[in-house]
Amino acid sequence: MFSRVAGKYDLLNNVISLGTQKRWRAALFDQLTLKAGMDCLDLCCGTGDLTIALAQQAGPSGRTVGLDFNRPMLTIAKQKIRKAGLSKEVELVQADAMHLPFPDGSFGVVTIGFGLRNVPDAGQVLAEAFRVLKPGGQFACLEMSQPTNPLVKVGWRAYFRLFPHLAQLFGGKAADYRYLQTTAQRFVSANQLLQMMQAAGFHERHYTKLNWGAGALHIGRK
């Protein structure tokens, strides 16, 4: 499914998120302690937007790795990285986020944006992210969430019924985006994800609600 949507992934993400995904990524960098020269890993990197932003922050003295299971997504990410002039700063790796091919304590920052809900075992991904972080390193997760306000919840559910058809208007397949609708609606709440981070070993954990709880930014430290 992700191979099918790769070519229109960026366009449709902007359409169905009404442009808010860019503001959500900006919120991540507002809260993440990221210095030039740091080693960064972006899990489930997709077409590379967050990976590119990490590399720009880490600079040429840093190391940024984008990891994804899907080859067509990585192909598009490579093109965008080249266009951004970051080919020397970014390494792309095709691998499973549940079984990371890196030694313990390899990175100062690990991120995942809108990918945790799509893996078979989110707890295992969190455990692996914790393992490859250096002591004192930070983890950041941007993800869809479950609004708790009743009025927001009604609007959130109504929009999720609509957006597969909206995606179809822009050239996507409604069935593919019904899958994404399902994963978003079934994913854990922000509080539950915070508890999963605790189980993985993270401390200094906190989260920020985004769009009245439709999304959440979670930050933790090793």
Image (spheres, rainbow, N blue to C red):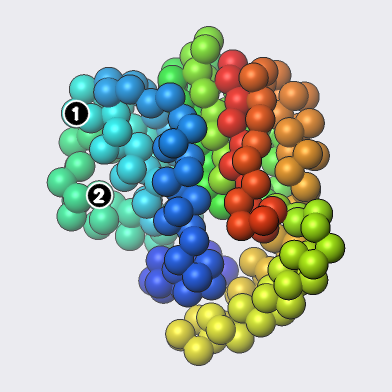
Q: Earlier in the sequence, mark 1 or mark 2?
A: 1
> Which residue shows up at 66% across the image and 82% down it?
162
At mark 1, the secondary structure is loop
Instruction: Please indicate whether residue 4 sits to the left or right of residue 178 in the image.
Output: left
**Which image quadrant is residue 90 in?**
top left
- Residue type, mark 1 in image: Pro
Instruction: Please indicate whether residue 66 sits to the left or right of residue 43 in the image.
Output: left
**Tag on residue 81?**
2
Percent position (x, y) of residue 4?
49, 72
Estimate how packed mark 2 is, as few (under 14), some (14 to 19) or many (20 or more) residues with alpha carbons within 10 Å. many
Pick whichever, 173 or 54, lies toward us: 54
> Which residue shows up at 46% across the image and 85% down it?
171
- Above or below, 132 relative to 84: above
> Which residue shows up at 44% across the image and 36% down it?
30
Percent position (x, y) of residue 119?
65, 48
Pick whichever, 219 or 40, lies toward us: 219
- Above or below, 154 relative to 93: below
- Above or below, 51 relative to 12: above
Q: Which residue is mark 1?
A: 60
Quadrant where the C terminus sits is top right
- Residue type, mark 2 in image: Ile
Pick whichever, 127 or 28, lies toward us: 28
**Viewer can see residue 103:** no
